[in-house]
Image: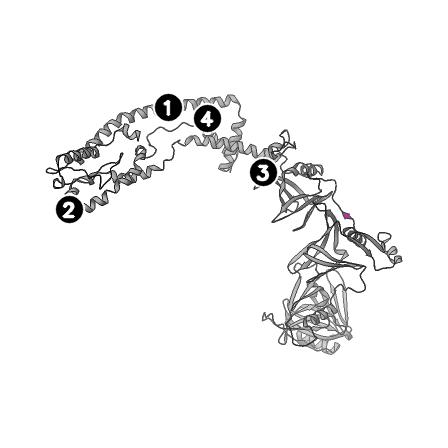
Amino acid sequence: MADTLEFNDIYQEVKGSMNDGRLRLSKAGLMYKNSKTGKVENIAAADLSEGVWRRVALGHGIKLLTRAGHVYKYDGFREGEFEKISDFFKTHFHVDLVEKDLCVKGWNWGSARFGGQLLSFDIGEQPAFELPLSNVSQCTTGKNEVTLEFHQNDDSDVSLMEIRFYVPPTQEDGVDPVEAFSKNVLSKADVIQATGDAVCIFRELQCLTPRGRYDIRIYPSFLHLHGKTFDYKIPYTTVLRLFLLPHKDQRQMFFVISLDPPIKQGQTRYHFLILLFSKDEDITLTLNMSEEEVEKRFEGKLKKNMSGCLYEMVSRVMKALVNRKITVPGNFQGHSGAQCITCSYKASSGLLYPLERGFIYVHKPPVHIRFDEVNCVNFARGTTTTRSFDFEIETKQASQYTFSNIEREEYGKLFDFVNAKKLNIKNRGLKEGVKQPYDDYADSDDDQQHDAYLERMKEEGKIRENADSDDSGDETDESFNPGEEEDEVAEEFDSNPSASSSSAGSDEDEGEKKKKKAKKPKIVKEKKPRKKAEGKKGKDPAAPKRPMSAYMLWLNASREKIRGENPGISITDLSKKAGEIWKSMNKEKKEEWDRKAEEAKRDYEKAMKEYNEGNQSEAPKKDKKSKTEKKSAKKPEKGKSVKAVSPARTPVKTNTVKSKEFVSSDESSSDESARKKGSEDEEMASTPPSSNESGSD
């Protein structure tokens, strides 16, 4: 057997990422050389305690365990190389290479086994996955639950960030399985341990993000946030910036700590730690260090005994330990004299602080935007009311932040601040050459600042008004008469029934018909006053069309030209473009189209006059013909007389049309006076009302 074995394209798993390299096996041990970094890693033969051969994603792999508890994984072997490698391990390393496959059932219920630096999750006798405990950065416990967080790997595209284990309760007294699990993890994990005494402790501080009250223990190298549910250990190396911001009410202070990487609570990431203090709260602080140690470590920045406002003590200690400056608001002052602006971001209300080098919004969610990240800003009118406006910030990474519901009084102050910082204002275009006072925008006489956005909206509104008013020239001025359709339905009751209907049926049937038909005139009475609009059925297609305005005549003649100059332009944009061209056209050119519009108007009036005269000449012929048809339809049969229904049975009111339901036989007539009255009623029913009568109604 050869004394050495070499394998190319072997991958070593390090902190979740796979590094390509070469593996060499010799009598002295194993040597792996990373092809990317050139780093060489040696494992002595005497240190090997166990070897496992298993199937992995990249073919087959070897897992090696050392006597010190370290684990090494190498993948990329072929299946046929197992016997050769197994014999080499047995001959030179005196270690059996055991074949053991991973469980691929996909179950999430099993047992956790701690072995050296590994946490193995086994399902039955087979391991499902293994976690190197050296990669664990945080271990938190809850009720029957343990959460492990891992260090981020910048070299890997995808990294495991967090995993949770449910630990069922047991009946054993005095042993908490959750605490036992956590201790096993912490004993091997790379977790910051709170060893020694804290430099100082601040009790029950109000924290806005993450929300709650926490005890802050200050250690030399990290900050320990201890709450009722969660604990956070924040190394000072992860602190980017410190902010001390006064609240708008001038009675409270925000202390903001910017973190990278952020602290995590479940799926939530907190990039900012925000503490809220009252200005009236004082404290006397004593550092848990000797005066010599304090002087040597902090060089006069801190003293052993200090007293003052609570927010001053916290910010002073943090500044000395983190060794970073504290950012405070600059010279900006809003309308009310505060150094911030009340606004809304997304669904929450908060405060926007214009700083010397950026903007910061607190508190939900906190946002910090540096000026060097800003591409442009935009002032937009509020969507719900004109008493407020929106402030939009667009970054160079194409992210947009919209701060809405800002009071109109803050507009001038914020505009001047942005202009002084030389930020690109997106809607500055109409500002040049226009002197429009700010009170047109704000309805106030206090400020005299220009609103560029308002000017742009006014210009677009005028263009749309011109286009809409001229487009309406093709429409008729015919008003909507809701009674027309109802009058058409009422005509069913005005029509004369046939002559044969009066002689059919028995006396009982006639009595029932009289009762039913006597109610119908009441319906006709309600619709009667609207019969004057009966002749107006709709627009006559033979009527002359209304003339177009000068603008529409010009637009019809110039539409194709505008489309040719602007290929692909939409109908809306074409109307806006045409409105702009028409507005900028000189008076001489407009007079040409005004003359054409006047000629078209005169032609329309002449044609309309002829059309009305023709309708009036045809109207008498139609009326005469209709009267003749109605009289012939109302002529009674021979041997029959007409009698009116007595007023006691059917009340007769003025303006009520009488129809055939009042016709009865000679047998029902009583005397000569009744027959005379019935003949008069028949004449009223058969004769239509004159135009004067209907008009008076």
Residue 395: quarter of image: top right
Q: Main secondary structure of the magenta part?
A: loop
Question: Which corner quadrant holds the C terminus?
Answer: top left
Q: Identify residue type, mark 1.
A: Glu
Q: Residue 233, image x and y in percent?
A: 74, 60
Report the Cα–Cα distance between label 3 and label 1.
46 Å
Residue 359: quarter of image: top right
- Segment tinted magenta in the rendering: 325-329
Q: Which mark is residue 507?
A: 2
Residue 446: quarter of image: top right
Q: Which residue is mark 3?
A: 386
**Callout in the foreground (4, 2):** 2
At 78% from the left and 75% from the top, the residue drawn is 46
Question: Which corner quadrant holds the N terminus?
Answer: bottom right
Q: Identify residue type, mark 2.
A: Asp
Q: Residue 552, image x and y in percent?
A: 45, 29
The residue lying toward the viewer, choosing from 486 and 672, is 672
Report the Cα–Cα distance between label 2 and label 1.
62 Å
Q: Secondary structure at mark 2?
A: helix
The residue lying toward the viewer, choosing from 594 and 191, is 191
Q: Which residue is mark 4?
A: 550
